[in-house]
């Protein structure tokens, strides 16, 4: 036989056997402890023969089910069914006690016939006894020995009347009291219960959490809510004391204040811990709310070391069972003693080695206190440094505070660390204290005056000079410096004020710019550099030359003029070339040129001459008809923005015409060409007026040359002398019969041109 066919036949037999017994119905039920859930089941005999079945409830919760009136957990239900027959079964399912918690449970059925079949019924137990519980407030604050109340709201949301009991957990039962702890609450009804909480006076001050529970009598059903109560410290003891001092040689009393800031009366015991030579004169006090009492402490004679001794004042509340303690310090000292409470130097408290400036006389102030129990007559002295003490003698009562002032004399001291000793002597008492201070040179300044230490020569012809002075702060403090100049207004400087940090330098720039109308000669001033604690002066000496008031003097110069050509018309006309030179150091505006007593025509337009600039101006001189003079003077007028100058030039027509040459003659050299020439209007302007005349005789022949004019050599000599010294030609010429050439040579020897040193900036 085929093995596969046998295997299939065996499986069919087994399947037929497994399905021979069948139970159908609702296997998911819901109930509570009061009302059962019902279910109908059908038992089938699917076998080929009559069978007897036994149905039982087994395992946990087997007592919950009643089937066809039988408690099948105690005795199986027997049913006989023929082949193909079935029978209906009716079940009642519910917990047999109300102390079971709502939730998911199971009941197991076991069916025995030709084998055993198991069926599981899922049972959901729900709350049928419903309570609502609310507590308000959720948190309450309360003080020791006081009582607070909470409201408890109860509501029966179940389907039947219930008996309710209330309980509390989390705090001592003695603290709590319900206005009603057990009651009958009908279905749907509500009730408010008051919960009073009164902690013990010695209860711990903190937040206490508690739970109120409502239990349904005869069941495990309950409802609970949590709330809290914060117990605050209602007992507040404040202990204070000030300046506790004791004397080792004799008994002394100190005072301590104890105050009850609590809401109720309190009884306290008081004690001292930490030292064995002090005690309270009373051991207990009773204080009403808000009351304060002063308690005396007796400090006995002791051999303990002088100094600060810490101890505790302790109080114990017999009502609140609470300790309060406060730490204090008592100074054990000699009966005759003076202490220095504080030291000030120049108005500031001193807590370590101070620093002061040697420029000042520092002032110490000592705050002395008689810490003894007797008055002390004192004498005060300072050694080590020169000093004045005020007062040098004084009486200090017990506990009295007095100040002394000590002014140190540092006038003979050098910078550095200084030491001095303060000695205080009195009856039964002597004290010496050593002190150290550092003395600094705080405000020393040094000034580098550049070239200001020498006489400064200044040219008033729009010339300026600049100098740089350097201020160095050699002190230890930053300083504010300022610069002042007492003298001519044409001395300018910047900056006027500056901050110079310690060890740094600051440049101050001086600018000397005498105006054109500054008088010649010596001008002095005083420059002052001021710092915070120092001042440095320097006298400035200047010599101004040139300008409006220059002393020009006179000179006699011979001039040879040569004529360019004669224009032969009805009138006699000379064509002349004139050169104008600006030998000054400033600009000059030439407004016009003309001649006096002779008609002339200049080919000239208004112009400005730069320093050392030369221009050539053609001019025609109209001598008129029948002019037979061969030697005559021409007066030249030069109009400038500085004034009008008049010059005389001699013309000799008898000399042979020569090659045209330009002769540069400074203004000062031309002053004395004619004896009647007036002084210049503006002496500060140096103008060279150069007239080139090519004289041609009024005769037919021409071409003979005469020897060269000596004027050329004179002018060349004058040009080699510094412009600011040309006026000396005139000065030397006055009352001097020497030849002008010789005078020029002498001046040249005196005034060797030297290069002026350049001012250095630091």
Image (cartoon, rainbow, N blue to C red):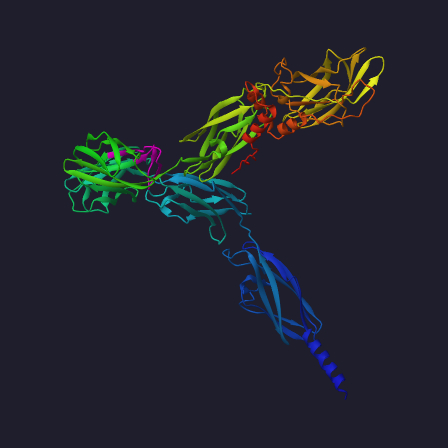
**Which x, y percent locates residue 170?**
41, 49
Q: Quadrant of residue 644?
A: top right
- Seen in the image, is 222 located left or right of residue 626? left
Q: In the figure, 393 relative to 567: above or below? A: below
The magenta span reads 343-368
Q: Residue at x 41, y 38 (%)?
A: 475
- Residue 743: image location, x then y, percent: 58, 25
Looking at the picture, tell me which residue is in the foreground, 46 or 187: 187
Question: Disc count in the image?
Answer: 0
Q: Where residue 248 appears, x then y in whole percent?
A: 16, 42
Q: Nearer the viewer, residue 436 or 701?
A: 701
Within the image, what quadrant is residue 387 found in? top left
Quick check: can you spot residue 506?
Answer: yes
Locate residue 157, reporting x and y percent. Answer: 55, 45
**Residue 555 belongs to magenta span:** no
Q: Camera-side residue: 518 or 39? A: 518
> Relative to residue 436, is residue 277 drawn left or right?
left
Q: Is residue 700 left or right of residue 664?
A: right
| Quadrant of the frame with the N terminus | bottom right
Q: Is residue 59 above or below residue 607?
A: below
Residue found at x 16% / y 45%: 302
Residue at point 24%, 47% (across, down): 274
């Amino acid at each position: 036989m085929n093995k596969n066919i046998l295997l299939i036949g065996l499986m069919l037999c087994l399947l037929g056997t497994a399905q021979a017994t069948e139970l159908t119905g609702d296997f998911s039920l819901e109930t509570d402890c009061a009302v059962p859930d019902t279910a109908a089941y059908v038992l089938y005999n699917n076998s080929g023969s009559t069978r007897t079945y036994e149905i039982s409830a087994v395992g946990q919760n087997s007592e919950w089910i009643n089937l066809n009136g039988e408690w099948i957990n105690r005795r199986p239900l027997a049913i006989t069914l023929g082949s193909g027959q079935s029978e209906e079964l009716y079940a009642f399912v519910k917990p047999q006690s109300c102390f079971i918690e709502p939730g998911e449970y199971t009941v197991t059925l076991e069916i025995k016939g030709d084998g055993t079949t198991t069926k599981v019924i899922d049972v959901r137990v729900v709350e049928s006894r419903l309570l609502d519980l609310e507590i308000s407030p959720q948190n309450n604050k309360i003080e020791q020995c006081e009582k607070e109340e909470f409201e408890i709201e109860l509501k029966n949301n179940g389907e039947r009347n219930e008996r309710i009991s209330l309980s509390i957990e989390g705090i001592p039962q003695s603290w709590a009291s319900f206005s009603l702890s057990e009651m009958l609450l009908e279905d749907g009804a509500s009730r408010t219960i008051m919960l009073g909480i009164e902690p013990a006076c010695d209860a711990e001050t903190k937040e206490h959490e508690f739970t109120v529970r409502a239990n349904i009598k005869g069941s495990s059903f309950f409802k609970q809510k949590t709330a809290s109560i914060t117990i605050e410290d209602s007992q507040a003891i404040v202990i204070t004391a000030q300046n506790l001092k004791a004397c080792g040689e004799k008994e002394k009393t100190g005072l301590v204040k104890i105050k009850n800031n609590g809401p109720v009366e309190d009884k306290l015991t008081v004690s001292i811990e930490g030292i064995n030579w002090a005690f309270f004169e009373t051991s207990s006090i009773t204080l009403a709310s808000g009351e304060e009492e002063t308690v005396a402490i007796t400090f006995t004679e002791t051999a303990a070391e002088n100094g600060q001794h810490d101890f505790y004042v302790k109080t114990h509340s017999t009502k609140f069972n609470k300790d309060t303690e406060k730490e204090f310090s008592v100074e054990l000292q000699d009966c005759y003693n003076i202490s220095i409470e504080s030291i000030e130097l120049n108005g500031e408290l001193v807590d370590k080695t101070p620093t002061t400036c040697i420029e000042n006389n520092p002032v110490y102030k000592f705050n002395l206190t008689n810490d003894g129990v007797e008055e002390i007559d004192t004498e005060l002295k300072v050694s080590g440094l020169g000093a004045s003490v005020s007062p040098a003698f004084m009486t200090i009562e017990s506990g009295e505070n007095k100040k002394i002032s000590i002014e140190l004399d540092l006038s003979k001291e050098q910078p550095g660390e200084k030491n001095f000793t303060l000695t205080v002597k009195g009856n039964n008492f002597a004290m010496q204290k050593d002190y150290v201070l550092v003395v600094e040179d705080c405000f020393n300044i040094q000034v580098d005056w550049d070239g200001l230490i020498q006489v400064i020569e200044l040219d008033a012809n729009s010339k300026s000079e600049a100098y740089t002075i350097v201020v160095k702060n050699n002190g230890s403090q930053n300083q504010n410096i300022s610069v002042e100049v007492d003298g001519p207004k044409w001395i300018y400087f910047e900056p006027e004020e500056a901050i110079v940090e310690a060890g740094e330098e600051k440049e101050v720039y001086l600018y000397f710019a005498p105006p054109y109308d500054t008088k010649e000669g010596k001008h002095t001033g005083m420059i002052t550099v001021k710092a915070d604690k120092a001042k440095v002066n320097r006298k400035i000496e200047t010599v101004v030359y040139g300008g409006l008031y220059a002393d020009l003097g006179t000179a006699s110069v011979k001039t040879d003029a040569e004529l360019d050509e004669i224009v032969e018309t009805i009138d006699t006309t000379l064509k002349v070339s004139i050169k104008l030179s600006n030998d000054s150091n400033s600009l000059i505006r030439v407004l016009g040129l003309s001649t006096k007593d002779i008609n002339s025509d200049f080919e000239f337009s208004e112009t400005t001459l730069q320093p050392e600039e030369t221009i050539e101006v053609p001019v025609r001189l109209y001598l008129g008809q029948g002019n037979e003079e061969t030697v005559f003077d021409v007066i030249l007028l030069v109009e400038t923005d500085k004034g009008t100058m008049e010059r005389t030039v001699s013309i000799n027509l008898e000399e042979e015409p020569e090659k045209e040459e330009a002769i540069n003659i400074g203004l000062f050299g031309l002053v004395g060409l004619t004896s009647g020439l007036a002084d210049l209007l503006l002496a500060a302007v140096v103008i060279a007026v150069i007239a080139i005349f090519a004289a041609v005789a009024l005769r037919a022949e021409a071409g003979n040359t005469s020897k060269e004019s000596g004027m050329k050599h004179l002018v060349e000599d004058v040009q080699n002398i510094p412009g600011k010294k040309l006026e000396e030609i005139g000065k030397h010429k006055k009352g001097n019969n020497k030849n002008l050439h010789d005078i020029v040579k002498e001046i040249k020897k005196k005034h060797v041109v030297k290069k002026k040193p350049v001012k250095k900036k630091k």
